Amino acid sequence: MSQKQHPNLPPRVRLAHTPTPLEPLPYLSARLDGPNLFVKRDDCTGLAMGGNKARQLEYYLGQAVAQSADTILITGAVQSNFVRQAAAAARKCGMDCHIQLEDRVPHNDATYMGSGNVLLDHLLGATIHTFPEGEDEAAADANLEAIADTLRTQGRRPYVIHLGIDHPPWGGLGYIDAGREIAQQAQTMDIDFNAVVVATGSGLTHAGLLAGLRAAGQRVPVYGVCVRRDAVQQKARIERRLGEILDLAGLSRDTATAQDVHVEDTWLGPGYGRMTDEIREALDLGAGTEALILDPVYTGKVMAGLIGMVRRGDFKKTDNVLFVHTGGSPALFGYEELNKAVARD
Protein backbone atom coordinates (compact mmCIF):
# COMPACT_ATOMS: atom_id res chain seq x y z
CA MET A 1 0.00 0.00 0.00
CA SER A 2 2.85 2.38 0.73
CA GLN A 3 4.80 3.99 -2.06
CA LYS A 4 7.48 6.58 -2.70
CA GLN A 5 6.32 9.79 -4.29
CA HIS A 6 9.86 11.05 -4.79
CA PRO A 7 13.27 9.62 -3.82
CA ASN A 8 13.75 12.37 -1.22
CA LEU A 9 10.36 11.91 0.44
CA PRO A 10 9.27 9.34 3.05
CA PRO A 11 6.78 6.53 2.44
CA ARG A 12 3.22 7.61 1.74
CA VAL A 13 -0.19 5.96 1.58
CA ARG A 14 -3.02 7.35 -0.53
CA LEU A 15 -5.92 8.46 1.65
CA ALA A 16 -7.22 11.73 0.18
CA HIS A 17 -9.35 12.24 -2.91
CA THR A 18 -7.17 14.68 -4.80
CA PRO A 19 -6.99 17.01 -6.57
CA THR A 20 -9.76 18.71 -4.63
CA PRO A 21 -11.88 21.27 -6.50
CA LEU A 22 -10.95 24.93 -6.81
CA GLU A 23 -14.09 26.98 -7.36
CA PRO A 24 -15.19 30.61 -7.69
CA LEU A 25 -17.42 32.19 -5.04
CA PRO A 26 -19.39 34.73 -7.12
CA TYR A 27 -22.31 35.24 -4.73
CA LEU A 28 -20.14 35.76 -1.65
CA SER A 29 -17.93 38.11 -3.69
CA ALA A 30 -20.99 40.12 -4.72
CA ARG A 31 -22.40 40.20 -1.18
CA LEU A 32 -19.12 41.60 0.17
CA ASP A 33 -18.66 43.94 -2.81
CA GLY A 34 -15.00 43.07 -2.69
CA PRO A 35 -12.42 41.10 -4.67
CA ASN A 36 -13.03 37.96 -6.69
CA LEU A 37 -13.15 35.18 -4.10
CA PHE A 38 -12.34 31.52 -4.73
CA VAL A 39 -12.27 28.42 -2.52
CA LYS A 40 -9.95 25.43 -2.43
CA ARG A 41 -12.26 22.61 -1.34
CA ASP A 42 -10.08 20.54 0.95
CA ASP A 43 -13.25 19.71 2.81
CA CYS A 44 -13.71 17.29 -0.11
CA THR A 45 -10.76 14.97 0.57
CA GLY A 46 -13.21 12.17 1.23
CA LEU A 47 -11.75 10.48 4.32
CA ALA A 48 -14.51 10.14 6.98
CA MET A 49 -16.32 13.36 5.94
CA GLY A 50 -13.19 15.02 4.56
CA GLY A 51 -10.78 17.71 5.69
CA ASN A 52 -7.21 18.88 5.32
CA LYS A 53 -5.67 16.35 7.71
CA ALA A 54 -6.11 13.54 5.18
CA ARG A 55 -3.18 15.03 3.24
CA GLN A 56 -0.98 15.08 6.34
CA LEU A 57 -1.99 11.59 7.39
CA GLU A 58 -0.77 10.16 4.08
CA TYR A 59 2.79 10.73 5.30
CA TYR A 60 2.27 9.70 8.93
CA LEU A 61 0.49 6.50 7.94
CA GLY A 62 3.10 5.86 5.27
CA GLN A 63 5.73 5.70 7.97
CA ALA A 64 3.47 3.65 10.24
CA VAL A 65 2.93 1.06 7.50
CA ALA A 66 6.66 0.99 6.70
CA GLN A 67 7.38 0.33 10.40
CA SER A 68 4.77 -2.47 10.54
CA ALA A 69 2.79 -0.57 13.17
CA ASP A 70 -0.58 -1.97 14.19
CA THR A 71 -1.90 0.97 16.25
CA ILE A 72 -2.02 4.74 15.72
CA LEU A 73 -1.95 7.17 18.66
CA ILE A 74 -2.89 10.84 18.41
CA THR A 75 -3.96 13.72 20.67
CA GLY A 76 -6.26 16.68 20.06
CA ALA A 77 -9.18 18.73 21.31
CA VAL A 78 -12.47 16.99 22.04
CA GLN A 79 -13.93 18.04 18.67
CA SER A 80 -10.65 17.54 16.79
CA ASN A 81 -10.90 16.91 13.05
CA PHE A 82 -7.35 15.53 13.02
CA VAL A 83 -8.24 12.90 15.63
CA ARG A 84 -11.35 11.86 13.68
CA GLN A 85 -9.46 11.51 10.41
CA ALA A 86 -6.56 9.70 12.10
CA ALA A 87 -9.02 7.10 13.40
CA ALA A 88 -10.38 6.73 9.86
CA ALA A 89 -6.90 6.51 8.34
CA ALA A 90 -5.95 3.82 10.83
CA ARG A 91 -8.98 1.76 9.79
CA LYS A 92 -8.16 2.24 6.10
CA CYS A 93 -4.71 0.79 6.84
CA GLY A 94 -5.99 -2.10 8.94
CA MET A 95 -4.84 -0.62 12.25
CA ASP A 96 -6.36 0.20 15.62
CA CYS A 97 -6.40 3.76 16.94
CA HIS A 98 -6.04 5.22 20.43
CA ILE A 99 -7.03 8.87 20.65
CA GLN A 100 -6.49 11.31 23.47
CA LEU A 101 -9.05 14.09 23.85
CA GLU A 102 -7.71 17.21 25.58
CA ASP A 103 -9.77 19.59 27.70
CA ARG A 104 -8.98 22.56 25.45
CA VAL A 105 -12.35 24.33 25.06
CA PRO A 106 -14.58 25.40 27.99
CA HIS A 107 -17.53 23.26 26.92
CA ASN A 108 -18.76 20.35 28.99
CA ASP A 109 -22.34 19.96 27.79
CA ALA A 110 -23.49 16.60 26.48
CA THR A 111 -23.69 17.86 22.90
CA TYR A 112 -20.05 18.99 22.76
CA MET A 113 -18.76 15.92 24.59
CA GLY A 114 -20.70 13.32 22.62
CA SER A 115 -21.78 14.59 19.21
CA GLY A 116 -19.94 15.73 16.07
CA ASN A 117 -16.41 14.39 15.77
CA VAL A 118 -16.70 12.48 19.06
CA LEU A 119 -19.61 10.47 17.68
CA LEU A 120 -17.51 9.63 14.61
CA ASP A 121 -14.53 8.66 16.79
CA HIS A 122 -16.74 6.10 18.53
CA LEU A 123 -18.25 4.92 15.26
CA LEU A 124 -14.75 4.31 13.91
CA GLY A 125 -14.03 2.12 16.92
CA ALA A 126 -11.26 4.23 18.43
CA THR A 127 -10.16 3.68 22.01
CA ILE A 128 -10.64 7.04 23.71
CA HIS A 129 -8.50 8.50 26.49
CA THR A 130 -8.95 11.88 28.15
CA PHE A 131 -6.34 14.44 29.18
CA PRO A 132 -7.16 17.31 31.56
CA GLU A 133 -4.86 19.93 30.03
CA GLY A 134 -5.51 21.82 26.83
CA GLU A 135 -2.56 24.14 26.44
CA ASP A 136 0.42 21.89 27.23
CA GLU A 137 1.52 20.16 24.04
CA ALA A 138 4.61 18.57 25.62
CA ALA A 139 2.57 17.03 28.44
CA ALA A 140 -0.07 15.76 26.01
CA ASP A 141 2.64 14.11 23.90
CA ALA A 142 4.29 12.64 26.99
CA ASN A 143 1.00 11.06 28.04
CA LEU A 144 0.62 9.61 24.54
CA GLU A 145 4.05 8.04 24.89
CA ALA A 146 3.01 6.54 28.23
CA ILE A 147 -0.03 4.97 26.55
CA ALA A 148 2.23 3.71 23.76
CA ASP A 149 4.58 2.13 26.32
CA THR A 150 1.65 0.29 27.87
CA LEU A 151 0.62 -0.98 24.45
CA ARG A 152 4.16 -2.21 23.79
CA THR A 153 4.06 -4.28 26.97
CA GLN A 154 0.96 -5.91 25.52
CA GLY A 155 2.82 -6.86 22.36
CA ARG A 156 1.40 -4.05 20.19
CA ARG A 157 3.40 -1.96 17.71
CA PRO A 158 2.22 1.66 18.16
CA TYR A 159 3.01 4.67 15.98
CA VAL A 160 2.60 8.05 17.69
CA ILE A 161 1.52 11.17 15.79
CA HIS A 162 2.87 13.93 18.01
CA LEU A 163 1.37 17.38 18.46
CA GLY A 164 4.29 19.30 19.94
CA ILE A 165 6.79 21.55 18.23
CA ASP A 166 9.78 19.35 19.10
CA HIS A 167 8.79 16.52 16.74
CA PRO A 168 9.37 16.41 12.95
CA PRO A 169 6.45 17.92 11.00
CA TRP A 170 6.03 15.08 8.50
CA GLY A 171 2.42 16.08 7.87
CA GLY A 172 3.54 19.38 6.37
CA LEU A 173 4.67 17.46 3.29
CA GLY A 174 1.01 16.88 2.48
CA TYR A 175 0.54 20.61 2.10
CA ILE A 176 3.56 20.96 -0.13
CA ASP A 177 1.53 18.66 -2.37
CA ALA A 178 -1.50 20.93 -1.93
CA GLY A 179 0.47 24.06 -2.80
CA ARG A 180 1.71 22.51 -6.00
CA GLU A 181 -1.83 21.33 -6.76
CA ILE A 182 -3.20 24.86 -6.34
CA ALA A 183 -0.47 26.25 -8.61
CA GLN A 184 -1.37 23.73 -11.32
CA GLN A 185 -5.10 24.46 -11.02
CA ALA A 186 -4.50 28.21 -11.16
CA GLN A 187 -2.49 27.76 -14.33
CA THR A 188 -5.15 25.55 -15.91
CA MET A 189 -7.90 28.02 -14.99
CA ASP A 190 -5.75 31.01 -16.05
CA ILE A 191 -6.04 32.70 -12.64
CA ASP A 192 -3.35 34.79 -10.99
CA PHE A 193 -4.03 34.84 -7.27
CA ASN A 194 -3.20 37.96 -5.30
CA ALA A 195 -3.65 36.37 -1.87
CA VAL A 196 -4.31 33.04 -0.17
CA VAL A 197 -6.03 32.91 3.23
CA VAL A 198 -5.74 29.82 5.43
CA ALA A 199 -6.01 28.74 9.07
CA THR A 200 -2.82 28.76 11.10
CA GLY A 201 -2.84 26.52 14.17
CA SER A 202 -0.34 23.70 14.61
CA GLY A 203 1.41 25.26 11.63
CA LEU A 204 1.83 22.32 9.28
CA THR A 205 -0.94 23.32 6.85
CA HIS A 206 0.14 26.97 6.73
CA ALA A 207 3.89 26.30 6.45
CA GLY A 208 3.51 23.37 4.07
CA LEU A 209 1.18 25.33 1.79
CA LEU A 210 3.60 28.24 1.68
CA ALA A 211 6.50 25.91 0.88
CA GLY A 212 4.52 24.15 -1.85
CA LEU A 213 3.42 27.37 -3.54
CA ARG A 214 6.96 28.76 -3.49
CA ALA A 215 8.39 25.47 -4.79
CA ALA A 216 5.91 25.75 -7.68
CA GLY A 217 7.12 29.28 -8.48
CA GLN A 218 4.10 31.08 -6.97
CA ARG A 219 4.97 34.26 -5.05
CA VAL A 220 1.40 34.94 -3.89
CA PRO A 221 1.16 36.13 -0.25
CA VAL A 222 -0.24 33.51 2.13
CA TYR A 223 -2.11 34.95 5.13
CA GLY A 224 -2.56 32.70 8.14
CA VAL A 225 -5.54 33.56 10.36
CA CYS A 226 -4.69 32.56 13.94
CA VAL A 227 -7.01 30.04 15.58
CA ARG A 228 -5.12 29.33 18.81
CA ARG A 229 -2.16 31.66 19.48
CA ASP A 230 -1.45 35.34 19.01
CA ALA A 231 0.45 36.63 15.99
CA VAL A 232 3.83 36.91 17.71
CA GLN A 233 3.82 33.32 18.95
CA GLN A 234 2.34 31.98 15.74
CA LYS A 235 4.78 33.73 13.41
CA ALA A 236 7.72 32.24 15.27
CA ARG A 237 6.10 28.80 15.09
CA ILE A 238 5.45 29.04 11.33
CA GLU A 239 8.97 30.26 10.63
CA ARG A 240 10.39 27.25 12.47
CA ARG A 241 8.02 24.78 10.87
CA LEU A 242 8.64 26.23 7.41
CA GLY A 243 12.38 25.57 7.64
CA GLU A 244 11.82 22.06 8.98
CA ILE A 245 9.32 21.16 6.26
CA LEU A 246 11.63 22.44 3.54
CA ASP A 247 14.40 20.26 4.99
CA LEU A 248 12.14 17.17 5.10
CA ALA A 249 11.15 17.77 1.47
CA GLY A 250 14.74 18.17 0.34
CA LEU A 251 14.13 21.78 -0.71
CA SER A 252 16.47 24.71 -0.15
CA ARG A 253 15.62 26.95 2.77
CA ASP A 254 15.81 29.82 0.28
CA THR A 255 12.61 28.45 -1.33
CA ALA A 256 10.56 30.34 1.28
CA THR A 257 11.82 32.47 4.15
CA ALA A 258 10.61 34.33 7.24
CA GLN A 259 9.69 37.29 5.03
CA ASP A 260 7.03 35.10 3.41
CA VAL A 261 5.27 34.39 6.72
CA HIS A 262 2.19 36.53 7.37
CA VAL A 263 -0.12 35.90 10.33
CA GLU A 264 -3.22 37.78 11.46
CA ASP A 265 -4.73 37.51 14.96
CA THR A 266 -7.39 40.24 14.77
CA TRP A 267 -10.12 37.58 14.71
CA LEU A 268 -8.62 35.24 17.31
CA GLY A 269 -11.32 36.25 19.80
CA PRO A 270 -11.28 34.67 23.27
CA GLY A 271 -9.32 31.66 22.03
CA TYR A 272 -9.40 28.25 20.40
CA GLY A 273 -12.84 26.89 19.62
CA ARG A 274 -14.67 29.88 21.12
CA MET A 275 -17.62 31.36 19.26
CA THR A 276 -17.75 35.06 18.34
CA ASP A 277 -20.27 37.22 16.51
CA GLU A 278 -17.86 37.43 13.57
CA ILE A 279 -17.63 33.64 13.35
CA ARG A 280 -21.40 33.28 13.47
CA GLU A 281 -21.74 35.81 10.65
CA ALA A 282 -19.13 33.89 8.64
CA LEU A 283 -21.01 30.61 9.12
CA ASP A 284 -24.23 32.26 7.96
CA LEU A 285 -22.67 34.01 4.96
CA GLY A 286 -20.77 30.94 3.79
CA ALA A 287 -23.86 28.76 3.89
CA GLY A 288 -26.33 31.40 2.77
CA THR A 289 -24.42 32.54 -0.32
CA GLU A 290 -22.39 29.55 -1.53
CA ALA A 291 -23.61 26.51 0.48
CA LEU A 292 -20.19 26.39 2.14
CA ILE A 293 -20.52 24.59 5.47
CA LEU A 294 -17.90 26.00 7.83
CA ASP A 295 -17.01 25.14 11.43
CA PRO A 296 -16.61 27.38 14.50
CA VAL A 297 -13.01 26.36 15.24
CA TYR A 298 -11.06 26.73 11.99
CA THR A 299 -12.85 27.60 8.77
CA GLY A 300 -15.46 29.86 10.41
CA LYS A 301 -12.69 31.85 12.06
CA VAL A 302 -10.71 32.04 8.82
CA MET A 303 -13.78 33.15 6.86
CA ALA A 304 -14.42 35.78 9.55
CA GLY A 305 -10.87 36.95 8.97
CA LEU A 306 -11.29 37.01 5.20
CA ILE A 307 -14.53 38.99 5.50
CA GLY A 308 -12.83 41.40 7.89
CA MET A 309 -9.84 41.84 5.59
CA VAL A 310 -12.17 42.61 2.67
CA ARG A 311 -14.08 45.19 4.72
CA ARG A 312 -10.82 46.67 5.98
CA GLY A 313 -9.77 47.34 2.40
CA ASP A 314 -6.84 44.91 2.32
CA PHE A 315 -7.65 43.86 -1.26
CA LYS A 316 -8.51 45.65 -4.50
CA LYS A 317 -11.79 44.79 -6.21
CA THR A 318 -9.85 43.36 -9.13
CA ASP A 319 -7.84 41.00 -6.89
CA ASN A 320 -8.29 37.23 -6.92
CA VAL A 321 -8.28 35.85 -3.37
CA LEU A 322 -8.26 32.14 -2.47
CA PHE A 323 -9.87 30.82 0.73
CA VAL A 324 -8.57 27.40 1.75
CA HIS A 325 -11.48 25.35 3.12
CA THR A 326 -9.81 22.83 5.43
CA GLY A 327 -13.05 21.04 6.38
CA GLY A 328 -14.29 20.43 9.91
CA SER A 329 -18.06 20.44 9.39
CA PRO A 330 -18.70 17.56 11.88
CA ALA A 331 -17.65 19.90 14.70
CA LEU A 332 -20.72 22.03 13.98
CA PHE A 333 -22.89 19.41 15.64
CA GLY A 334 -20.97 19.76 18.89
CA TYR A 335 -21.94 23.41 19.39
CA GLU A 336 -25.28 23.50 21.16
CA GLU A 337 -25.40 27.30 21.08
CA LEU A 338 -25.65 27.14 17.29
CA ASN A 339 -28.73 24.93 17.57
CA LYS A 340 -30.30 27.40 19.97
CA ALA A 341 -29.43 30.35 17.71
CA VAL A 342 -30.96 28.62 14.68
CA ALA A 343 -34.12 27.91 16.69
CA ARG A 344 -34.39 31.61 17.60
CA ASP A 345 -33.87 32.64 13.99
Image (cartoon, rainbow, N blue to C red):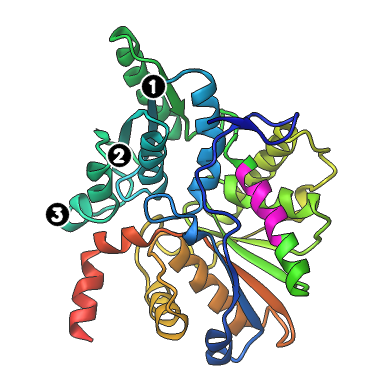
Task: Label 1: state its secondary structure.
Answer: loop
Q: CA distance from mark 1 to mark 2?
A: 21 Å
Label 3: which residue? 110
Label at residue 191:
none
Q: Is residue 272 left or right of residue 117?
A: right
Q: Give whichever of discs 1 and 2 has the lower sequence position.
A: 1
* Residue 241 in which image quadrant: top right
Label at residue 70:
1
Task: Label 2: state its secondary structure.
Answer: strand
Taking the spot 73% from the left edge, 48% from the top edge, the residue there is 211
Image x and y of residue 35, in percent: 66, 84
> Callout 1: few (<14), some (14-19), or many (20+) C-alpha neighbours within 10 Å?
some
Task: Label 3: state its secondary structure.
Answer: helix
Label at residue 101:
2
- Kindly tell me whether residue 20 is visible in this rendering: yes
> Which quarter of the rendered picture does the C terminus lie within?
bottom left
The magenta stretch is 174-182
Name the residue type under label 3.
Ala
Front-lying residue, 250 or 167:
250
Which SS type dominates the magenta stretch?
Answer: helix
Front-lying residue, 296 or 187:
187
Q: CA distance from mark 3 to mark 2?
A: 15 Å
Q: Give whichever of discs 3 and 1 has the lower sequence position.
A: 1
